[in-house]
Every structure is written in structure tokens, then in C-alpha cells.
Image: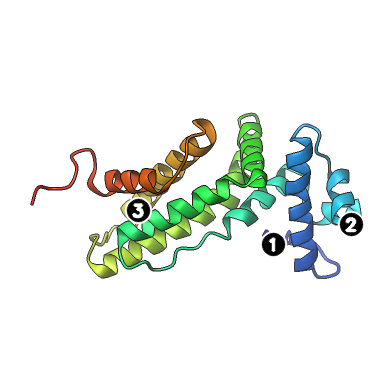
């Protein structure tokens, strides 16, 4: 959930009101679609004044991105004991999230709109992409501590590796689930994880 803009004053924001507004945004988007969605629709569904929305979000684009970001912020990566198990777990949870109508509709809407709006692309990057890279960082740190992955001393290269891992996993799952509309089931996830772990050459012969 985004922080209040610097310099804005007034009553403290209510977490409950924010949650209700973001939930109402997702519901309205599923029902109306991006083009018909208005701040008025959201305020009516959430039971708040339209001015309340504009005190928190400058417009529809910011609001919808934050509504999507809240869904992805719920993703967690419990320690499953191995890098392979960690990857399989988070990919399955991510796929489950993408099966929810509000997640599918909202994500596809903001991605489509962002092709014409550079500011929206920047907001998607900061509010969704960059925040979700925390899962990659956590998974790599655990794997390094277990001795499954080498440490990278160069911070720039480590950051580049994190970006690449995120792009490969998130991009593949989103394409599979939302573009190809194919199932992301346990068999597919296990095959994908094996490819990610061992590359195109496959596991080394015993």
C-alpha cells in the first residue's frame, strides 16, 4: 500500500479505508473493465467520498496499480528446505493468484494501458515489480546459506542476477497463465523448476 505523498497534511490515513478502496477498485474493474472504470464507481462501492480517493491517489492509474500491488504483496516464501522446493512453492502460489478474476483483470488492464503511458510503466515497476523482487532476494540468500548457490561479491552483478531470475520466473508464469491460458499445475511447475535449476543441458549425469 502506498505511502501518503510528502507535504500532504490532514487526518491520518485509515488502513481499513485503504483496504476497502483497493478491494472496491478490483471488483469494479472486473465488472466494468478499464475503460469504463471511474473514481466515482470506486468511491460509491467503497462507501467513501470521491475527495477521499483524490487525497490518496492522483487518478485511476495510480489507484489500479496499488490495487494490483496489494494482491501481490500477499505472496510469501516460507523456507521449504531447498531452492527447488522454494521455487515450486512460490510459482504455484503465484499461479493461484493469477487465477483469481480480480488479479487477472487488473494485471492485464494495467499492463495494456502502460504500453501508452510511460508514467504508469514506472509506477508498475516501483509498486509491483521492484517490491516482488524481495522474494528472489530472500530465496537466493537462503540457497546461498545452504550452499546451493555461490555468493556474488559484486553488488551490481548480484542485482542483475536478481533481475534476470525475476524476469524469467514472473514472465514465464504470466505468459503461461494469462497469454497462453494453459494450466500451471504441479507437473508443469516441476518441469519448469528443473529447467530453471539445470538449464537446457539437464541435470549432470551421475
Q: Foreground residue, 157 or 145?
A: 145
> Which of pointers 1 and 2 indicates the residue nearer the eye?
2
> Which of pointers 1 and 3 indicates the residue nearer the eye?
1
Quarter-wise, where is residue 141 in the image?
Answer: bottom left
Residue in view at x 37 percent, y 66 percent = 80
Q: Position of residue 47 (x, y in %)?
A: 89, 57
Mark number displayed over residue 59:
none
As drawn, is 23 to the left or to the right of 181?
right
| Residue carrying label 3 | 156
Residue in view at x 78 percent, y 51 percent = 24
Q: Position of residue 163 (x, y in %)?
A: 40, 48
How far, Cα to Cα, is label 1 from label 2? Answer: 21 Å
| Residue carrying label 2 | 47
Image marks 1 and 3: residues in contact by CB distance under 8 Å: no
Q: Foreground residue, 32 or 183?
A: 183
- Say few, some or many: other residues with alpha carbon within 10 Å of mark 3 (under 14 / 14 to 19 / 20 or more): few
As drawn, is 133 to the left or to the right of 35?
left
Marked residue nearer the N-terminal end (1 or 2):
1
From where the camera sits, is residue 200 visible? yes
Amino acid at each position: 500500500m502506498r505511502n501518503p505523498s510528502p507535504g500532504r497534511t490532514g487526518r491520518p490515513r485509515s488502513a481499513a479505508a485503504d483496504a476497502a478502496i483497493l478491494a472496491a477498485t478490483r471488483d469494479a474493474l472486473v465488472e466494468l473493465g478499464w475503460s469504463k472504470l471511474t473514481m466515482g464507481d470506486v468511491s460509491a462501492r467503497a462507501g467513501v467520498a470521491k475527495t477521499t480517493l483524490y487525497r490518496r491517489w492522483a487518478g485511476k492509474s495510480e489507484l489500479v496499480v496499488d490495487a494490483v500491488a496489494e494482491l501481490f504483496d500477499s505472496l510469501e516464501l516460507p523456507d521449504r528446505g531447498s531452492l527447488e522446493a522454494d521455487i515450486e512453492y512460490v510459482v504455484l502460489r503465484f499461479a493461484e493468484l493469477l487465477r483469481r478474476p480480480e488479479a487477472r483483470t487488473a494485471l492485464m488492464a494495467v499492463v495494456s494501458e502502460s504500453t501508452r503511458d510511460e508514467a504508469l510503466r514506472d509506477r508498475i515497476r516501483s509498486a509491483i515489480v521492484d517490491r516482488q523482487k524481495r522474494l528472489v532476494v530472500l530465496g537466493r540468500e537462503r540457497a546461498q546459506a545452504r550452499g546451493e548457490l555461490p555468493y556474488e561479491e559484486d553488488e551490481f552483478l548480484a542485482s542483475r542476477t536478481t533481475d534476470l531470475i525475476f524476469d524469467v520466473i514472473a514472465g514465464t508464469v504470466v505468459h503461461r497463465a494469462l497469454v497462453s491460458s494453459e494450466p500451471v499445475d504441479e507437473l508443469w511447475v516441476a518441469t519448469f523448476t528443473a529447467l530453471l535449476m539445470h538449464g537446457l543441458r539437464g541435470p549432470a549425469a551421475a
